Image (cartoon, rainbow, N blue to C red):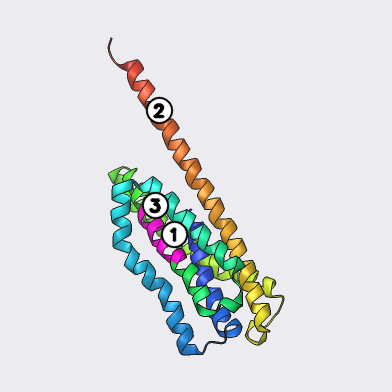
Amino acid sequence: MSVLVSTVMMATLVVGPFYLSRALGLDATRVGLVLSIGPLAAGLTGVPAGRLADSFGAQRMTIVGLSGIAAGSLCLSFIPAALGTIGYIAPIVVLTACYALFQTANNTEVMTDIRPDQRGVISGMLNLSRNLGLITGASVMGAVFSLGSETVNVTTAHPEVVATGMRVTFTVAAMLSVVALALAFGSRGARRSRASATSRSRRQSAPM
């Protein structure tokens, strides 16, 4: 799940500047300002996300976060350039805020379920999964954007062509988010099955 989500998030940084500058016609300063809104939303969501995970459970908030990421990606895959900057910012805020919620809840769930002697290894694997996702997002999703734009040089492409490439990229991102969501539901079901089996085993081994 962490690899897939990081791939989606990196796509926003790869595709966003081209869409904002080529399709929406923003200058470098305004592109930078718009791009800063996503990280700002994620940063401001950090502490509330932790409280939500503690209050409602890490598993539940992991699913909520993934659902928001999928919804934000889906909106970006349909968004018309006519909506302008606001039409881009709104889904990005949803996507990045839900990313912060997912990361908090997922990390909490993973680190709670392990033995003390495994914490270092598991922390390293979480870090590795994020880095793998960022690499995949920069390379694979960048290639998807280029193929979706049907052009070799995106910097000189027609605005509508760039907008089409952005929509194709986030269609793929939405699919990846749905796969991550399916994994979350599968993990939840597996945990419930293990808990039920453990409970039955304890009842059977209890003295009469």
Q: Position of residue 178 (x, y in %)?
A: 55, 53
Q: Is residue 191 magenta?
A: no
Task: Work out how far the residue at label 3 is from the one at label 2, CA to CA, in angstroms.
Answer: 22 Å
Label 1 environment density (alpha carbons within 10 Å; few <14, some 14–19, many ≥20): some
Kindly identify the residue that appears in the image at 43 percent across and 83 percent down.
33
Q: Which mark is residue 128?
A: 1
Q: How much space separates mark 1 and mark 2, taking CA atoms?
A: 32 Å
- 12 vs 159: above or below: above
Circle 1/circle 3 CB separation < 8 Å = no
Task: Please report whichever mark, 1 or 2, sits nearer to the chain's N-terminal start.
Answer: 1
The residue segment tinted magenta is: 94-106
Nearer the camera: disc 1 or disc 2: 2
Q: Is residue 172 left or right of residue 32?
A: right
The image's mark for residue 196 is 2
The residue identified by callout 3 is 106
Three-letter amino acid code at the position of disc 1: Leu
Place residue 23 in its image quadrant: bottom right
Residue 172 pos. (x, y %) = 61, 62
